């Protein structure tokens, strides 16, 4: 395993961190609470045995089962080998005592006495002003730190770069930030500018969605061919991961792994990682040629995080978006229309309630897309 500086902390973090948002489940639903704990324990411990020393989870992941499964995986001495990052469910905080109540619940689920890093989850401008500010969450976090319940305070982020800058500048005690970043999201959310801004201030930068929900691991055939021609034998996912590790500002890359095969492949990639591992030509190729080709082909940049679920109308929103995107990208819309009909995820049932849009980290305007998806997949209209 390769290790990297975790900001100005003086601690060395493994290049790869284990993200626990997409654990293996018995029903193959990436957000279900039906986690396969036995397989999860094997995967997490295998990763730790090969040098991973950072694991990340959150209160809502797998409907709470992520924290429980991770807690079991960290028994038998494994807790002492890693630092745990968990997240305060900021969007759920409605009363003055909620911060502490959720924190104690998370410690119980994980079977630990303290958390190494405790992040304010999914900050945007509204949550920063109207929840973090209103309920004095930073003061509460500092009190929990004084009591030894948490060791370090951080935040995860889903908004624009100006808001990211505002949050970074709004508190002197940040000891970690978690941002969505990959070679397609150069200007999305915090983006490259945010990564540099935090790193320049000594704040460790952890990266989520390094493969943009799998889009960069399984790209459309034209892009797959272009990447192969540039470097025969290098997998698409390796391009994306090495692009991140090539940057000194990135401390750790969190990968949400659902199978042991993914764990092994990610670990193998991490062991080849280094700052400056890509050539100038490779960086330019990804940033310009591949980036622009991808942007032409992906209609809806959904990462399949499933934050939008459940839908009050029982619409499987990520499933429908994936069908819609793939019909366009791979040119097989007829097959996608059959799947749309068979599985009965009728997007026309959308009532435009906006609940999904409030929860979508990508701010995709989901309700409007549901109408368009039904026109194309359900009614046979062209893209």
Image: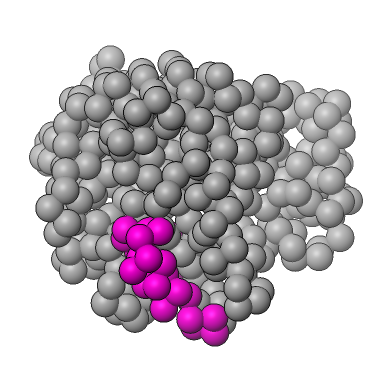
Q: Is residue 12 left or right of residue 299?
A: left
Q: In the rendered view, would you say 299 is above or below 368?
A: above
Q: Is 173 covered by the magenta stretch?
A: no
Q: Residue at x 72, y 40 (%)?
A: 320
Residue 323: x percent and y percent?
Answer: 68, 35
Quadrant placement of the C terminus: top right
Q: For this rendering, which residue is in front, 298 or 257?
A: 257
Structure colour scheme? one colour
Q: Tell me which corner region of the image, top left, top right, bottom left or bottom right, holds residue 109.
A: top right
Q: In the rendered view, would you say 318 is above or below 271?
A: below
**Residue 306 visible in the displayed image:** yes
Q: Tell me which corner region of the image, top left, top right, bottom left or bottom right, holds residue 134.
A: bottom right
Region in magenta: 133-161
Q: Residue at x 32, y 78 (%)?
A: 171
Residue 312: x percent and y percent?
Answer: 84, 54
**Residue 363 visible in the displayed image:** no
Q: For this rendering, which residue is in front, 86 or 369?
A: 86
Q: Is residue 192 left or right of residue 103?
A: left
Q: Residue at x 28, y 15 (%)?
A: 233
Q: Residue at x 54, y 51 (%)?
A: 106
Quadrant placement of the N terminus: top left
Q: Is 138 covered by the magenta stretch?
A: yes
């Amino acid at each position: 395993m390769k290790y990297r500086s975790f900001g100005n902390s003086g601690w060395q973090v493994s290049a790869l961190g284990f993200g626990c948002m997409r654990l293996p489940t018995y029903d193959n639903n990436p957000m279900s609470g039906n986690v396969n704990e036995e397989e999860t324990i094997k995967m997490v411990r295998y990763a730790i045995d090969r040098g991973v020393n950072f694991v990340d989870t959150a209160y809502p992941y797998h409907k709470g089962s992520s924290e429980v499964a991770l807690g079991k995986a960290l028994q038998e001495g494994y807790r002492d080998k890693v630092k745990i990052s968990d997240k305060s469910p900021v969007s759920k905080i409605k009363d003055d005592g909620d911060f502490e109540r959720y924190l104690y619940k998370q410690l119980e689920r994980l079977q630990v006495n303290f958390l190494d890093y405790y992040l304010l989850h999914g900050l945007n401008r509204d949550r920063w002003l109207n929840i973090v500010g209103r309920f004095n969450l930073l003061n509460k976090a500092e009190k929990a730190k004084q009591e030894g319940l948490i060791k370090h305070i951080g935040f995860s982020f889903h908004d624009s770069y100006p808001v990211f800058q505002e949050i970074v500048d709004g508190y002197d005690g940040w000891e970690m930030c978690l941002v969505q970043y990959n070679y397609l999201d150069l200007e999305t959310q915090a983006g490259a500018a945010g990564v540099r801004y935090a790193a320049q201030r000594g704040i460790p930068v952890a990266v989520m969605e390094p493969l943009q929900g799998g889009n960069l691991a399984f790209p459309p055939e034209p892009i797959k061919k272009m990447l192969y021609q540039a470097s025969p034998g290098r997998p698409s996912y390796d391009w994306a991961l090495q692009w991140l590790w090539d940057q000194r500002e990135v401390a750790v890359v969190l990968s949400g792994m659902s199978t042991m095969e993914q764990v092994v492949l990610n670990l193998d990639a991490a062991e080849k990682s280094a700052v400056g591992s890509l050539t100038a030509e490779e960086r330019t190729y990804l940033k310009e040629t591949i980036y622009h080709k991808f942007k032409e082909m992906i209609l809806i940049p959904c990462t399949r995080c499933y934050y939008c679920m459940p839908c009050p109308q029982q619409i499987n929103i990520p499933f429908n978006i994936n069908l819609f995107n793939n019909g366009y990208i791979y040119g097989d819309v007829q097959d996608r229309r059959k799947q749309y009909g068979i599985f009965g995820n009728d997007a026309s049932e959308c009532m435009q309630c906006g609940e999904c849009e409030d929860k979508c980290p990508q701010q995709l305007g989901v309700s409007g897309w549901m109408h368009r998806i039904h026109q194309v997949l359900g009614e046979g209209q062209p893209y």
